């Protein structure tokens, strides 16, 4: 089993190939994005994107169940260009090892950079016409759990300084 990140539900796979990876590689990807993104996120919308990514926590929701489509992310047409630029900067920060020293393991740099470059390709090829705002609307109004989907005030973990999701700290949950 593993996880796959696709461009969008109705997109032609010929645009860009989906990113398939092992569960372990998924954890590493999400860890380095959490570190980079939590440092770079300034606006509420940027923080929402990192919280959304941090909710893909396999230790809570299940191994092999956190694959997604780029179109499922909390995009809106209103701020699409700014958030696309932000996500690309988060990926660039992760490629440049932003806070990797905070991990309690040493990621396989070759593997992680290859995965991050593929994710960059997916984001680059995701265009405004692919945005389905209903994903964002559903996500921000889904309060089926005890904790709010987006923690109020965008708190960060006191140990890892990453944005918390409704599941808590992605890094703490992974045993760091």
Image (cartoon, grey):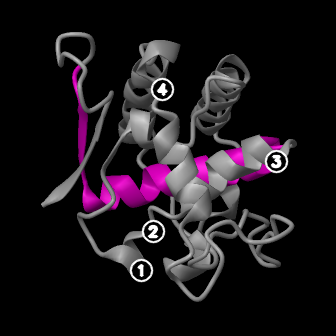
Residue of label 3: 44
Q: Is residue 176 left or right of residue 38?
A: left
Q: Is residue 100 visible?
A: no
Residue of label 2: 57
Q: CA distance from mark 1 to mark 3?
A: 24 Å
Quarter holding the N terminus? bottom left
Q: Who's the residue at 26% across and 64% down the image? A: 65
Q: CA distance from mark 2 to mark 4?
A: 24 Å
Locate residue 120, reporting x and y percent. 48, 24
**Vertical relation: 123 (above or below) 66:** above
Marker disc for residue 131:
4
Q: Would you say the magenta stretch is mainly helix, strand or loop?
A: helix
Residue of label 1: 60
Q: Nearer the viewer, residue 141 or 123?
A: 141
Q: Bounds of the magenta span?
A: 17-41
Numbered disc 3: secondary structure: helix
Nearer-N-terminus badge (4/1): 1
Nearer-N-terminus badge (3/4): 3
Q: CA distance from mark 2 to mark 1?
A: 6 Å
Q: Is residue 115 visible?
A: yes
């Amino acid at each position: 089993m593993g996880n796959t990140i696709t461009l969008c539900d109705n997109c032609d796979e010929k645009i860009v190939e989906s990113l398939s990876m092992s569960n372990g590689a998924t954890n590493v990807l999400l860890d380095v994005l959490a570190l980079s993104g939590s440092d770079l996120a300034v606006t509420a919308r940027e923080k929402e994107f990192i919280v959304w990514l941090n909710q893909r926590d396999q230790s809570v929701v299940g191994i092999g169940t956190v694959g997604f489509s780029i179109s499922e992310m909390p995009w809106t047409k209103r701020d699409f260009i700014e958030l696309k630029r932000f996500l690309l900067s988060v990926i660039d920060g992760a490629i440049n090892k932003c806070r990797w020293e905070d991990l309690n393991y040493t990621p396989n740099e070759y593997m992680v950079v290859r995965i991050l470059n593929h994710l960059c390709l997916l984001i680059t090829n995701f265009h405004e016409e692919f945005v389905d705002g209903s994903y964002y609307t559903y996500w921000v109004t889904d309060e089926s759990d005890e904790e709010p989907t987006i923690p109020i005030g965008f708190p960060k973990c006191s140990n890892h300084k990453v944005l918390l999701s409704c599941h808590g700290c992605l890094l703490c949950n992974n045993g760091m």
